[in-house]
């Protein structure tokens, strides 16, 4: 960043939670797509105990953009610094830091700073970046404080799980099945309605109605990133009442020896403790909610995996393979 093009922002939050809990929630970037509204997917490129490099896809200005960032983690002083290695125009460069300061009474001040440069330092672009940072930073800090103030260990509220199946056919065919979510209402028994838009290749907006084993119907809206037959990541913008956040990742892998393949469905969720009894009944616990979510989402994933497996095995009309 050149000094004459440097712009700064600072956003703060006072949370009724210890600084270590807040720091750890931010430090684990794999949780971000479920925790933070703008984040869609994270893919690590390098990862160590104090340094990491990753690509992050996020909603910015109404669309999906991505960039590569480097972060330095300092758990002793509770500071995380970051810098975009490759920014996306009109952002010319971006960096900053998270700082977690202990306050009296078990509270924490969280400070999120950004330093950025705009392409050509155009005033309209600078104003647009400021608005995007104001909106996203306020949203991220708000949900960070909400989760930390629940009073439960973070790992009890935010957690991940996976299901994997071996494929008798090609991973590419299973990828095609999951990619064509617009056909799921005809192909999957738990999906009753689908609307899919893909105005930008590889970026999909998906709305669908699903039915759980107990007969409950849910409408969800998601943005999906589809990449090179390797993976499909998604972030739900409209979640069932029990969840504050839900992100997922389908990974398609060919066997090293070329004999067979596998597909894995990974979910990361944020449970809303305040909604547990309203959804599951009086006396329901957070542990029961975790089990319910694992069972409901896992069942739907396993159903999709089973149908994708049949599709990869060749149990489909040739005209539907796209």
Image (cartoon, rainbow, N blue to C red):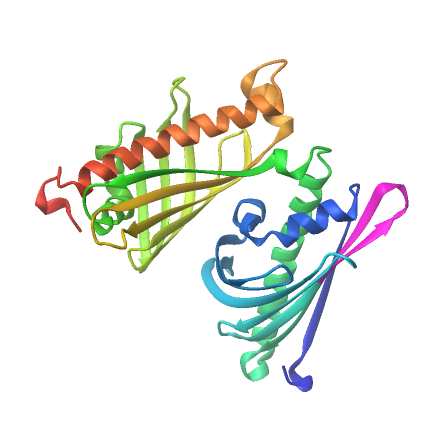
Residue found farthest to the top: 282
Q: Residue 142: where, in percent of width, then height?
A: 68, 47
Residue that appears at 73% across and 56% down: 75
Residue that appears at 31% across and 28% down: 190
On screen, residue 133 above or below 27 = below
On screen, residue 278 above or below 16 = above
Residue 150 lies in what quarter of the image? top right
Residue found farthest to the front: 257
Q: Nearer the viewer, residue 152 or 110?
A: 152
Q: How many marks?
A: 0
Name the quadrant of the N terminus: bottom right
Residue found farthest to the right: 104
Q: Nearer the viewer, residue 35 or 65?
A: 35
Check residue 118 for magenta coloring: no
Q: Residue 123: where, in percent of width, then height?
A: 60, 78
On screen, residue 191 above or below 251 = above
Residue that appears at 60% across and 72% down: 94
Residue 166 lies in what quarter of the image? top left
Q: Residue 230: where, in percent of width, then height?
A: 32, 55
In this rendering, position of residue 209 left or right of residue 154:
left
User: What secondary structure is the magenta-colored segment mainly?
Assistant: strand
In this rendering, position of residue 50 left or right of residue 228:
right
Residue that appears at 73% across and 33% down: 151
Q: Nearer the viewer, residue 238 or 297?
A: 297
Q: Which residues are magenta?
A: 98-113
Query: Is residue 229 visible to us here?
Result: yes
Q: Residue 125: where, in percent of width, then height?
A: 56, 74
Q: Nearer the viewer, residue 206 or 231?
A: 231
Check residue 107 for magenta coloring: yes
In this rendering, position of residue 171 left or right of residue 14:
left
Query: Is residue 112 visible to us here?
Result: no
């Amino acid at each position: 960043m050149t000094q004459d093009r440097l712009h700064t922002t600072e956003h703060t939050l006072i949370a009724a939670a210890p600084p270590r809990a807040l720091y750890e929630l931010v430090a684990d970037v794999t949780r971000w797509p479920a925790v933070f509204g703008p984040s869609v997917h994270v893919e690590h490129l390098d990862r160590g105990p104090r340094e990491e490099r990753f690509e992050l896809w996020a909603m910015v200005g109404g669309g999906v953009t991505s960039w590569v960032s480097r972060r330095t983690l300092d758990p002793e002083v509770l500071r995380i610094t970051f810098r975009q290695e490759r920014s996306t125009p009109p952002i010319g460069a971006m960096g900053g830091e998270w700082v977690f300061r202990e306050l009296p009474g078990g509270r924490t001040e969280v400070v999120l700073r950004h330093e950025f440069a705009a392409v050509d330092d155009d005033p309209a672009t600078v104003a647009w970046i400021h608005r995007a940072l104001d909106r996203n930073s306020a949203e991220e800090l708000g949900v960070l404080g909400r989760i930390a103030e629940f009073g439960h260990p973070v790992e009890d509220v935010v957690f991940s799980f996976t299901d994997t199946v071996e494929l008798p056919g090609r991973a590419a065919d299973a990828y095609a099945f999951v990619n064509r979510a617009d056909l799921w209402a005809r192909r999957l028994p738990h999906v009753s309605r689908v609307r899919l838009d893909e105005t930008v290749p590889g970026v999909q907006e998906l709305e669908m109605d699903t039915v759980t084993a107990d007969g409950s119907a849910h409408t969800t809206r998601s943005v999906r990133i589809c990449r090179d037959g390797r993976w499909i990541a998604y972030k739900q913008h409209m979640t069932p009442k029990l969840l504050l956040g839900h992100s997922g990742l389908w990974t398609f892998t060919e066997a090293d020896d070329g004999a067979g393949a596998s597909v894995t469905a990974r979910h990361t969720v944020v449970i809303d403790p305040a909604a547990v009894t309203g959804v599951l009944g009086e006396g329901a616990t957070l542990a029961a909610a975790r089990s319910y979510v694992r069972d409901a989402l896992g069942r739907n994933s396993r159903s999709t995996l089973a149908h994708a497996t049949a599709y990869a095995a060749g149990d489909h009309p040739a005209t539907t393979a796209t």
